[in-house]
Image: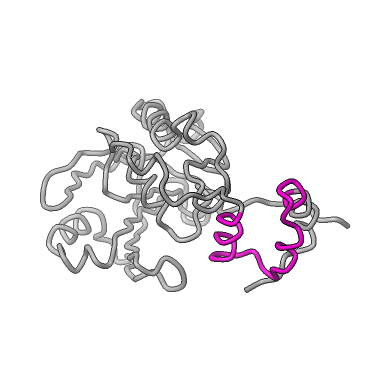
């Protein structure tokens, strides 16, 4: 458990004054993981039963949890890292279907395959570098059934690019207060808009810049990425895990 950093103290004091809970809050030494949940629930701002949990799954949603990211600069412009995130429990139950999926994607000698080691350890990561000098077309299957054909590519050198960028998205108040999640139905509409943009062949990438769904245990990421289409998840994806804050001095 880490101590509250001084740079965040003013913001915390403002919030606890607003909700008249400073005496109670100042008794807490840390604001991290389960403690953040306790704090939020004490303010009655993080309900367990939220409307988004009853919303139907989008028709274009894909359960294949694919990520495509640009390769590191030293590997060359046409290199990309293609990764597949699966549940360890699902791998044990349906190893055959997942092996078909992996064989389609990961034939490289540089393939990495391992369970998550430190957080969200119910997940397994399979990842490999691929050469996209020419577009790579894959027919991916889920649970033994043909799911969808997708093409992974990078823009041609020297051409302009088009992408969708957003930051600090939320759809749940499980860990923080997502004020407009129900008014704007962000659990459905954020993926719908993203899927709509990414369905165009003119779109090259999408990006989430920080505070990714305000997720602390992996469950919210599972839920929202299950709403994105496979076409969306086959586009280059750029992300950063948090915010960069200015420090005094």
Q: Quadrant of residue 62?
A: top left
Q: Decide whether the magenta segment is chiefly helix, strand or loop.
A: helix
The question of residue 115 being in magenta is answered with: no
**Left or right side of 22 for 137:** left
Quadrant where the image shows the C terminus: bottom right
Q: Quadrant of residue 34?
A: bottom right
**How many discs appear?**
0
Residue at far right of view: 249
Q: Does 220 sit above or below residue 229? A: below
Residue lying at 39% horizontally and 45% vertically, measured from the top left: 224
Q: Percent from the top left, x then y, of residue 147?
A: 17, 42
Residue lying at 33% horizontally and 50% vertically, measured from the top left: 66
Q: Percent from the top left, x then y, of residue 75?
A: 47, 56
Residue lying at 20% horizontally and 53% vertically, measured from the top left: 104
Q: Does 101 sit above or below residue 78? A: below
Towards the viewer: 125 or 53: 53
Quadrant where the image shows the N terminus: bottom right
Q: Quadrant of residue 97?
A: bottom left
Towards the viewer: 219 or 82: 219
Residue segment shown in magenta: 15-42
Towards the viewer: 67 or 34: 34
Q: Percent from the top left, x then y, of residue 36?
A: 59, 60
């Amino acid at each position: 458990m880490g101590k509250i950093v001084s740079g965040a103290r003013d913001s915390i004091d403002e919030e606890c004054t607003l909700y008249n809970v400073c005496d109670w809050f100042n008794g807490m030494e840390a604001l991290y993981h389960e403690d953040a949940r306790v704090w939020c629930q004490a303010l009655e701002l993080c309900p367990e039963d939220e409307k988004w949990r009853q919303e139907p799954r989008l028709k274009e949603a894909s359960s294949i949890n694919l990520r495509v990211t640009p390769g590191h600069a030293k590997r060359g412009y046409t290199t990309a890292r293609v990764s597949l995130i699966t549940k360890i429990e699902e791998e044990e139950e349906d190893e055959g279907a997942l092996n078909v999926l992996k064989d389609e994607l990961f034939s490289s000698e540089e393939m990495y395959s391992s369970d998550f080691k430190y957080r969200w350890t119910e997940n397994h990561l399979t990842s490999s570098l691929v050469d996209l000098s020419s577009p790579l077309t894959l027919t991916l299957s889920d649970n033994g059934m043909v799911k969808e054909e997708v093409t992974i590519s990078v823009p041609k050198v020297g051409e302009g690019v088009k992408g969708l960028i957003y930051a600090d998205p939320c759809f749940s108040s499980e860990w923080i207060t997502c004020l407009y999640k129900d008014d704007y139905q962000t659990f459905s509409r954020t993926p719908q808009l993203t899927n709509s943009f990414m369905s165009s062949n003119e779109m090259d990438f999408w990006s989430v810049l920080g505070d990714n769904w305000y997720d602390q245990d992996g469950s919210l990421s599972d839920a929202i990425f299950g709403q994105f289409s496979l076409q969306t998840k086959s586009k280059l994806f750029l992300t950063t895990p948090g915010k960069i804050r200015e420090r005094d001095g």
